[in-house]
Image: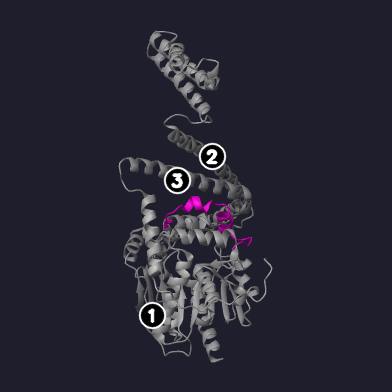
């Protein structure tokens, strides 16, 4: 294997583009990433070919860890090239997934706190329960009351409302991105898309509104005095 | 689980829903207005039109003979009509609140006035249908004689309103997009307001009780109604959630339907406002807010010791609610 393949490609590129290494500084981050990839592959291949199955497994794990860490680094870079749009879309989706996971983790934490609170309240009530109220059905109802109370406090709280809306909003963004992606594929296959259908719906609505007889309606009385907003 | 319970549950599968006889008097696409057949001597009162919410189906008001607000009103001799909004599909995604109020509801009112030759009618709005009824009465006061609202949200940002706290932070444009919102999605949201009671306790209680065919049938009917949620037209839902929940325009006097302002201060009709003390979906304060926002000199508010659903189907509601409404309407008619 030729150790200098990356440098040779770069030289070749410079020859064709007429751009020297000095003017090419804006591509430095990408060159550094390419070099780190080359190094990781070389190390993994060397390790895999040097031993038995165990060494091969270790080499694959090492390479996988490297790829995972490198792709995390790649996310914030500006998308370039002919696949720029797709790359941006994937980047956006990856970021949305990350935010979604963070919000879900927050919700899980809050639920865990609420259930602990409910369990504490339930234990306290059981301690003070008279014999009659400790029957199975009563205990269950007591648990439901405690759980619902704790849930209600959590659900009304700022942290829960915020985390829940973040989940919904990120899910909405992901769905919109996915729709956009599918629409692009559909267009390439000359299939009708939802956006096109919606345009037709709007046009039909406009035509119907134009054709509908205008009803004679008394107008609502104007407000006598302007009320102050509450 | 014993065999008699399983047998009773199997038999309950066929429990009928929607028991009072009715005939359609107006139909347009998915929209239908029904007129119920009388079962008592007619009372001296204008015809009544019931406006139910877009969420869930209106047969909740006529679930079974002994749990039926409609039957209660018919027994009092009222001429009862009901709007059934139908099941919106993908073609209705751009149906707006203006379409619902100024086109669909307006045509329903027209149909009832035509069918009964009455100059004006009594409007009975339930839940979101109550909000619609309030808006419609403000827009078309000449057609509404008396207004009755049940568990109707007016102030959408009261402290106890959990749904409101959740909705206010949601990016509605992204969540709804340009499509409809599935009824199942809305159902999950409603169930998550009280998950331990609504998703666990009631089923455990059902299993713990001794099998009783009648109770099981009631339970099955309720289950069927709860999960029978039509999809919601995207544009109307987005407007409703934004204008009412997020911006609370109705009580601020800034709500416009089409190009017209909905001014609660212009409401002069007699108003009967019923709401539940234990309502987790529309807290009492959300409904009671109506009292101080209208110009009606004949406002009557009743806080009943009931929950949101209990207002239509509980035993106590059967004893109190239809009689309260019928007595109030006939009393107003005599004046």
For disc 2, the marked residue is A99
Q: CA distance from mark 2 to mark 3?
A: 16 Å
Q: Secondary structure at mark 1?
A: strand
B226 or A132, nearer to the observer: B226
For disc 1, the marked residue is B35
A82 or B17, nearer to the observer: A82
The correct choice, above or below, for A117 with respect to B294 in the image is above
Tell me where residue A81 sits by quadrant.
top left
Query: Would residue B133 be counted in the magenta stretch?
Result: no
Q: CA distance from mark 3 to mark 1?
A: 43 Å
Q: Mark 2 falls within which chain? A: A
Name the residue rendered at 49%, 50% in the picture: B174
The correct choice, above or below, for B30 with respect to B120 in the image is above
Tell me where residue A142 sits by quadrant.
bottom right
- The part of the chain drawn in magenta is B156-182
The correct choice, above or below, for A167 with respect to A67 in the image is below
For disc 3, the marked residue is A176
B24 or A205, nearer to the observer: A205
Which x, y percent locates residue B238?
Answer: 50, 58
Tell me where residue B78 sits by quadrant.
bottom left
């Amino acid at each position: 294997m030729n150790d200098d393949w990356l440098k040779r490609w770069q030289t070749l590129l410079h020859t064709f583009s007429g751009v020297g290494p000095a003017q090419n500084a804006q591509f430095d981050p990408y060159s550094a990433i390419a070099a780190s990839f080359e190094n990781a592959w070389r190390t993994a291949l060397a390790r895999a070919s040097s031993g038995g199955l165990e060494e091969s497994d270790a080499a694959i794990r090492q390479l996988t860890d490297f790829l995972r860490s490198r792709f995390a680094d790649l996310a914030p870079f500006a998308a370039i090239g002919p696949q720029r749009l797709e790359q941006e879309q994937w980047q956006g989706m990856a970021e949305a997934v990350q935010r979604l996971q963070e919000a879900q983790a927050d919700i899980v934490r809050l639920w865990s706190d609420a259930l602990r609170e409910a369990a504490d309240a339930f234990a306290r009530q059981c301690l003070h329960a008279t014999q009659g109220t400790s029957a199975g059905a009563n205990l269950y109802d007591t648990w439901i009351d405690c759980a619902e109370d704790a849930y209600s406090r959590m659900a009304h709280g700022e942290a829960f409302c915020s985390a829940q809306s973040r989940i919904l909003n990120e899910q909405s963004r992901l769905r919109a991105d996915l729709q956009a992606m599918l629409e692009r594929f559909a267009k390439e296959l000359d299939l009708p898309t939802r956006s096109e259908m919606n345009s037709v719906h709007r046009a039909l609505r406009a035509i119907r509104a134009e054709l509908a007889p205008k009803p004679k309606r008394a107008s609502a009385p104007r407000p006598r005095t302007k009320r102050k907003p509450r | 689980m014993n065999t008699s319970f399983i047998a009773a549950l199997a038999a309950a599968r066929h429990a009928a829903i929607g028991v009072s006889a009715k005939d359609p008097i107006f139909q347009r696409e998915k929209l239908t207005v029904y007129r119920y057949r009388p079962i008592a001597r007619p009372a001296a009162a204008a015809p009544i039109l019931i406006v139910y919410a877009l969420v869930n189906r209106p047969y909740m008001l006529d679930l079974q003979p002994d749990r039926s607000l409609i039957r209660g009103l018919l027994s009092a001799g009222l001429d009862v009509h009901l709007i059934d909004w139908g099941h919106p599909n993908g073609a209705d995604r751009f149906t707006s609140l203006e379409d619902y109020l100024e086109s669909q509801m307006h045509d329903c009112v027209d149909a009832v006035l035509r069918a009964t030759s009455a100059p004006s009618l009594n409007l009975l709005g339930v839940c979101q249908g109550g909000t619609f009824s309030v808006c419609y009465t403000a827009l078309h006061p000449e057609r509404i004689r008396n207004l009755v609202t049940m568990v109707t949200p007016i102030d959408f940002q009261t402290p106890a309103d959990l749904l409101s706290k959740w909705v206010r932070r949601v990016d509605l444009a992204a969540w709804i997009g340009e499509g409809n919102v599935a009824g199942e999605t809305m159902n999950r949201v409603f169930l998550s307001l009280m998950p331990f009671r609504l998703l666990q306790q009631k089923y455990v209680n059902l299993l713990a009780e001794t099998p009783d065919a009648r109770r099981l049938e009631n339970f099955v009917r309720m289950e069927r109604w709860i999960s029978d949620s039509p999809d919601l037209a995207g544009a109307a839902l987005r407007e409703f959630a934004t204008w009412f929940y997020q911006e609370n325009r109705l009580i601020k006097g800034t709500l416009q339907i089409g190009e017209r302002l909905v001014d609660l201060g212009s409401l002069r009709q007699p108003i009967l406002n019923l709401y539940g003390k234990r309502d987790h979906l529309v807290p009492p304060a959300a409904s009671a807010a109506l009292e101080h926002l209208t110009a009606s000199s004949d406002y009557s508010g009743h806080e009943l010791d009931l929950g949101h659903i209990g207002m239509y189907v509980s035993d106590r509601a059967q004893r109190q609610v239809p009689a309260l409404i019928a007595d109030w309407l006939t009393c107003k008619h005599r004046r």
